[in-house]
Image (cartoon, rainbow, N blue to C red):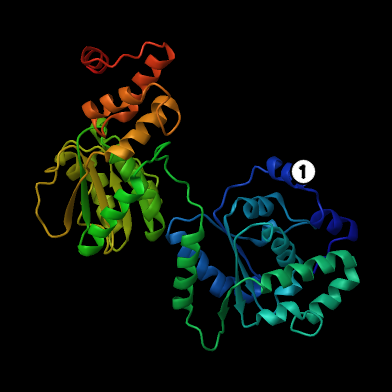
């Protein structure tokens, strides 16, 4: 086993914040969401590998290191970059974990993060605290002969910190691998940082609407397709993006297809679905071929799909067989036409988006028009008159009109002006 020199270890563990930031900026490493820290000979072919494949099946970018990355005496940029980019870190503590300086080095870096999940694989949290007389004692005796006391104490402190974090015990004699992997997978999906869709700068009243829709879906447990209907500008797409962000972690795969109304080449949607749902990069010559590939690939998969701004039922039928997805899947369709599916089947739910309540509409309007939640002094009556005319729809565009008028100091809300500005 190779050991680092005292000088190298000191520089590795006790860099300043500025130096750490510099190293991270210089590293052009691939970005990951989850980092798995483990002792390869102990767990790579069993627990670590199972966790990796489970999380990957949900579309997460998971780092499970390869031996070729561990060359030289310091953490390579790829490993440092993976640790820094990940929002969740899993540390699998096994009986021989402390023999690896790499595991200990990675742990020190991981603990700079706010989310570390310890897994105690045939060891106890107390074993990480009593280094000098537990299963890690022999490994640390060897470390003391090769590296500085300062570095050894840094490793010990990292183990003690990890022991104090609420973790998951795993006993090879009693624990079920499948159940354990599902359990830790659920925890990771709840904590991981997904790349969210941009919803809206001021999502006023959106949480209440989302809760109302969630309640309806739960009551109708057989729901597979949800049609979100409403007039243009009422907030259907905003709600759909919010749904995607909030529900993303519950599905093995997810895809958001936007601007259905304007799309002519439907095979581009199919390529997106293949890429995001099945991890395939394929050229599709026609929609029939793409639909067949998707139908075969989606069997058994629990997926979340959102089709935004659909104006033609035939477009949906050309892109996707909605009956091909696995159990537990959900497909959301936003449309101005509430009869877009012309179906009354039990697995289809219609949700009619209503205009914002007056208090929410007022706040949203003012955010866009005045960059604050209330009207500017002197414009209270004008805002009230405007809301009477337009209610809770198209407020962003309307707010921009008010803002432009206010900047020019020419705001005058007569009926004639409103007609001239908004027609």
Image quadrant where one finds the N terminus: bottom right
Residue 274 in view: no
Res 206 → quadrant? top left
**Residue 170 image point, x, y percent:** 56, 80
Where residue 225 sits in the image (x, y, percent)?
21, 53
| Extreme residue toward the bottom, this view | 173
**Quarter of the rendering occupied by the C terminus:** top left
Name the foreground residue: 3 vs 21.
Answer: 21
Q: For mark 1, what is the residue?
A: 18
Side of 413 where 103 appears, left or right: right
Q: Is residue 163 above or below residue 214?
A: below
Instruction: Say above or below: 315 vs 112.
Output: above
| Residue 113 appears anywhere in the view | yes
Bin the neighbour count of mark 1 within 10 Å (Cα to Cα): few under 14, some 14-19, many 20 and up.
few
Q: Image check: 7 left or right of 278?
A: right
Who's the residue at 36% across and 52% down the image?
254
**Residue visible at 62% across and 58% down in the picture:** 114
* Among the 4 quarters of the image, the one containing residue 125: bottom right
Query: Which residue occupies 39% across, 25% down?
Result: 369
Secondary structure at numbered mark 1 = helix
Report the front residue among 110 and 212. 212
Q: State whether residue 127 is above or below residue 115.
A: below
């Amino acid at each position: 086993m190779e050991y680092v020199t005292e000088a190298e270890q000191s520089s590795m563990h006790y860099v300043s914040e500025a130096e750490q930031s510099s190293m991270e900026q210089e590293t052009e490493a691939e970005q990951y969401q989850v980092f798995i820290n483990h002792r390869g000979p102990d767990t790579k072919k069993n627990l670590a590998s199972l966790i990796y494949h489970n999380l990957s099946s949900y579309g997460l970018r998971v780092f499970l290191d390869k031996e070729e990355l561990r060359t030289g005496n310091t953490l390579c940029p790829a490993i440092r970059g993976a640790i820094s980019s990940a929002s969740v870190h899993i540390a699998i503590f096994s009986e021989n974990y402390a023999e690896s300086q790499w595991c200990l080095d990675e742990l020190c870096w991981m603990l700079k993060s706010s989310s570390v999940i310890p897994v105690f694989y045939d060891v106890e949290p107390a074993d990480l605290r009593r280094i000098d007389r537990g299963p890690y004692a022999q490994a640390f005796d060897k470390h003391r002969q090769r590296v500085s006391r300062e570095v050894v104490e840094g490793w010990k402190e990292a183990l003690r910190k990890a022991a104090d974090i609420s973790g998951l015990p795993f006993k090879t004699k009693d624990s079920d691998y499948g159940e354990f992997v599902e359990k830790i997978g659920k925890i990771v999906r709840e904590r991981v940082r997904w790349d969210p869709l941009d919803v809206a700068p001021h999502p006023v009243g959106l949480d209440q609407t989302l809760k109302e829709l969630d309640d309806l879906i739960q009551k109708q447990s057989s729901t597979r397709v949800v049609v979100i209907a409403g007039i243009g500008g009422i907030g259907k797409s905003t709600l759909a993006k919010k749904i995607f962000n909030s529900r993303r972690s519950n599905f093995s795969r997810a895809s958001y297809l936007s601007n259905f109304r304007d799309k002519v080449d439907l095979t581009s949607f199919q390529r997106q679905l293949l890429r995001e749902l099945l991890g395939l990069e394929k050229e599709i010559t026609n929609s029939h071929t793409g639909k067949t590939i998707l139908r075969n690939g989606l069997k058994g998969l629990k997926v979340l799909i959102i089709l935004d701004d659909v104006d033609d039922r035939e477009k949906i039928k050309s892109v996707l067989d909605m009956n091909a997805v696995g159990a537990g899947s959900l497909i959301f369709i936003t449309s101005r036409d509430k009869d877009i599916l012309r179906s009354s089947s039990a697995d289809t739910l219609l949700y009619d988006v209503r205009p914002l309540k007056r208090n929410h509409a007022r706040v949203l309007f003012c955010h866009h028009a005045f960059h604050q939640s209330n009207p500017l002094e002197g414009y209270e009556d004008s805002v009230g008159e405007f809301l009477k005319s337009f209610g809770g729809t198209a407020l962003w565009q309307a707010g921009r009109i008010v803002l432009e008028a206010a900047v020019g100091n020419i705001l005058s809300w007569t009926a004639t002006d409103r007609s001239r500005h908004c027609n």
